[in-house]
Image (cartoon, rainbow, N blue to C red):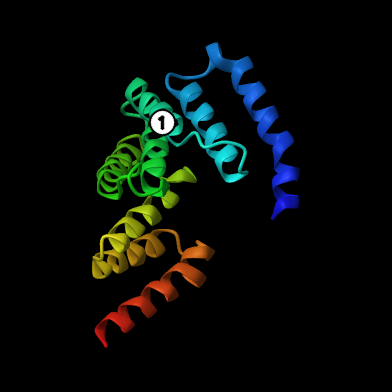
Amino acid sequence: LDVSKKQAAPYVERFRAHTEEMKDKLPAGYYDMYMSSVYAFEIMMGKSAHFISTLKLATSAAEKNPTNPITLGYRANVLFYAPNGIGNKKEALVIFKKCEQYYQAAQWKYCWNRPATLLTIAQCYEKQGDLETALQKTNALLKEFPNYKFVKETYLPQLKAKIAKQKK
């Protein structure tokens, strides 16, 4: 794991430098989203604890581009994955549902972020204890994206096992 962190560090620094270089050329909110990502990577690498800055920048990105499912989805991801007390899984679910509406309206059916958004909607329901809705959302996701290997081979079997255990 430490080797991976060492290997990742120069890429994160390049990402930061490139983001700074492109600041005035990026779509509205993308600079904040990318810098929030830099902070999130640094948190994962143990270099810093910018939890609040990560959330503030993610919020700013979504506010600057409020109908873009990419910036909104990033904010929802931060809310979903942030530690308790900083994150908010219920708010994340609301935002992820908005993202899905925007993906449909923009006809971004095959944007790679869309199936990831659909998966995270299912995970939000799972985290809230609504396993049946999580299962319904997961099955709908696989119906539309049948080759989503992680969902098919890992997430769905784990979710089904969790449901079976709950029913006992």
Q: Is residue 64 above or below residue 4?
A: above
Horizontal placement of 137 versus 9: left or right? left
Horizontal placement of 111 versus 121: left or right? right
Q: Position of residue 22 (x, y in %)?
A: 60, 17
- Comparing 42 with 141, the one in front is 42
Q: Is residue 110 above or below residue 158?
A: above
Q: Residue at x 59, y 37 (%)?
A: 42
Q: Residue at x 31, y 68 (%)?
A: 135
Residue 34 at least partly seen:
yes
Specify the amino acid type for callout 1: Ala
Name of the residue lying farthest toward the top: 24
- Comparing 130 with 107, the one in front is 130
Q: Position of residue 102 (x, y in %)?
A: 31, 37
Name of the residue lying farthest toward the bottom: 168
- Comparing 92 with 152, the one in front is 92
Task: Quadrant for residue 138, please give it.
Answer: bottom left
Q: Position of residue 78 (x, y in %)?
A: 41, 41
Q: Residue at x 42, y 27 (%)?
A: 57
Q: Residues within 10 Å of mark 1 (few under 14, many from 20)?
A: many
Residue picked out by circle 1: 58
Q: Is residue 65 above or below residue 136?
A: above
